[in-house]
Image: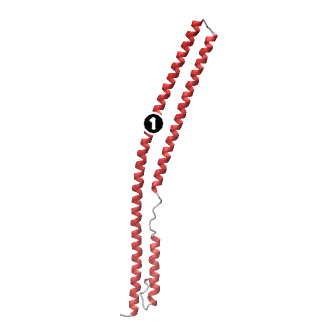
Amino acid sequence: MCPGLAAAGAAKTMFGLQVFSAGAGLVSGYINANRQVKHAERVANATSRQVREDLVRQYSLLARREVEEQQATSRRILDLTRDASEARGMSTASAAAAGVEGTMTDTILRDLAFQEQVRVEAAFGDRETGQVNLQSQREAIEATGRNRITGSIGPPVKTPNIFNTLFQIGGAYLNYQMNAPIQGGGLPNPLDR
């Protein structure tokens, strides 16, 4: 065999191997990227499902606590109202037994009503503060859930760049065209037609 043809054959084989290698790298890159995307989707879906379950459970606990606090406030207000009513009744009875009437009795009753009003307003204030705290806890639970989901997504998956592969193939072809004539022969350039 002529040494020029052997060199041209070797250059042609080298070019073919470089094209095959670039193509195989591109296909392998897409396969790996697809696997990574599917894995990331599975992780994100599992995390999202778990976060939703946790949110439902935590919201249920907060809702139960809210109802319990409302019931406790209602009982407290009812107790305050009952105690104030008893105190007014006892004051009226005591004043009548002592023979006190008029302005003095009215002043004592107004004072008892004022004390009752202050205590009832304090109970409503406590209830409102509890509502604000529960809302803050709901917002914190939501933020934690969002952060868990966002954290599970991970960095974006890089897909292979087809332009890099095309440049590799083009470089291999140029290398083939430049080296084939030097080695004693070579193939005709299809661009020369």
Q: What is the count of numbered marks?
A: 1
- Counting from the top left corner in percent of width and height, residue 12 is at 40, 84
Rendered image quadrant of residue 36:
bottom left
Q: Is residue 38 above or below residue 96?
A: below
The reply, left or right, for residue 36 in relation to residue 119 is left
Figure coloring: secondary structure
Residue located farthest toward the left when viewing the structure as drawn: 1
Rendered image quadrant of residue 190:
bottom left
The N terminus - image quarter: bottom left
Q: Work out whether residue 33 or residue 68 is closer to the camera in this orientation and state it.
A: 68
- Counting from the top left corner in percent of width and height, residue 117 is at 57, 22
Q: Work out whether residue 111 or residue 2 is closer to the camera in this orientation and state it.
A: 111
Q: Work out whether residue 90 or residue 165 is closer to the camera in this orientation and state it.
A: 90
Q: Work out whether residue 142 or residue 19 is closer to the camera in this orientation and state it.
A: 142
- Which residue: 50% across, 47% down? 143
Residue located farthest toward the bottom when viewing the structure as drawn: 2
Q: Which residue is mark 1?
A: 63
- Counting from the top left corner in percent of width and height, residue 6 is at 38, 90
Secondary structure state at the residue bearing disc 1: helix
Q: Is residue 179 above or below residue 165?
A: below
- Which residue: 60% across, 20% down? 114
- Which residue: 55% across, 34% down? 129
Q: Amino acid at mark 1?
A: Ala
The C terminus - image quarter: bottom left
Residue located farthest toward the right when viewing the structure as drawn: 103
Q: Is residue 123 above or below residue 33?
A: above
- Which residue: 44% across, 87% down? 180
The reply, left or right, for residue 159 in relation to residue 111 is left
Q: Residues within 10 Å of mark 1 (few under 14, many from 20)?
A: some
- Counting from the top left corner in percent of width and height, residue 39 is at 40, 59
